[in-house]
Amino acid sequence: MSEAWEELKRDCAGCHACPLGETRTKLVFGVGCEDAEVLFVGEGPGEQEDLQGEPFVGAAGKLLDDMLAMIGLDRSRVYIANVVKCRPPHNRDPQPNEQAACRGWLDRQIALIRPKLIVCLGRIAAMALIDPGFRITREHGQWFERDGRRIMATYHPSALLRDPGKRPEAFMDLREL
Ligand code: URA
């Protein structure tokens, strides 16, 4: 691992910039290939992620792995991170102040990975990275350009667990990759 990654992980590990830093069990930095061509960005850790310190390891994570496998990818070839690195209590949406406090870590991850493509998993990541007014039902699967990179959003795996009828649309989105 490069010095820049080590420094970023060290800095992030001690973060208490927002109240989520007080209630977390483990900070969930991110996982995957550090020069991946594709970066997936979720919302924030859930219960299992908070316990294990790794993103998408619960039921939604299993579905994400299955979706990656369907397009010939796996965790070792992409990078997976979240908008906020610490679990919001009771899995509520991360608040604007929490997202703002955490944003620098994600921006530094993006700067180091330099992915060709970014895929936002769900509305929260899409609002943070594409447009604050993003409408996931209308705009999923469409490519946007931000900071010279192509970026799109698809449904969050948790939404696909709640509503399996949306899975074909999510699959079509990922096929775009
Ligand atoms: N949901 C997310 O958005 N991120 C995770 O890491 C787990 C569940």
Image: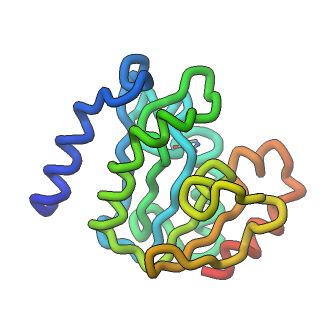
Observer-nearest residue: 72 or 86? 86
> Looking at the image, in which quadrant does ligand 1 appear?
top right
**130 is higher (above) or lower (below) than 125:** below
Residue positioned most to the top: 23
For the N terminus, give its image quadrant.
bottom left
Q: Which residue is located at x 42 percent, y 22 percent?
A: 19
Q: Position of residue 174 (x, y in %)?
A: 66, 73
Observer-nearest residue: 29 or 129? 129
Q: Position of residue 91 (x, y in %)?
A: 62, 28
Q: Position of residue 64 (x, y in %)?
A: 61, 56
The chosen color scheme is rainbow
Q: Which residue is located at x 81 percent, y 42 percent?
A: 162
Q: Which residue is located at x 27 percent, y 66 percent?
A: 112
Q: Which residue is located at x 19 percent, y 41 percent?
A: 11
Residue 106 left/right relative to 145: left
For the C terminus, give its image quadrant.
bottom right
Give residue 119's quadrant in the image. bottom right
Residue 95 left/right relative to 5: right
Residue positioned most to the left: 3
Give residue 3's quadrant in the image. bottom left
**14 is higher (above) or lower (below) than 136:** above
**8 is higher (above) or lower (below) than 37:** above
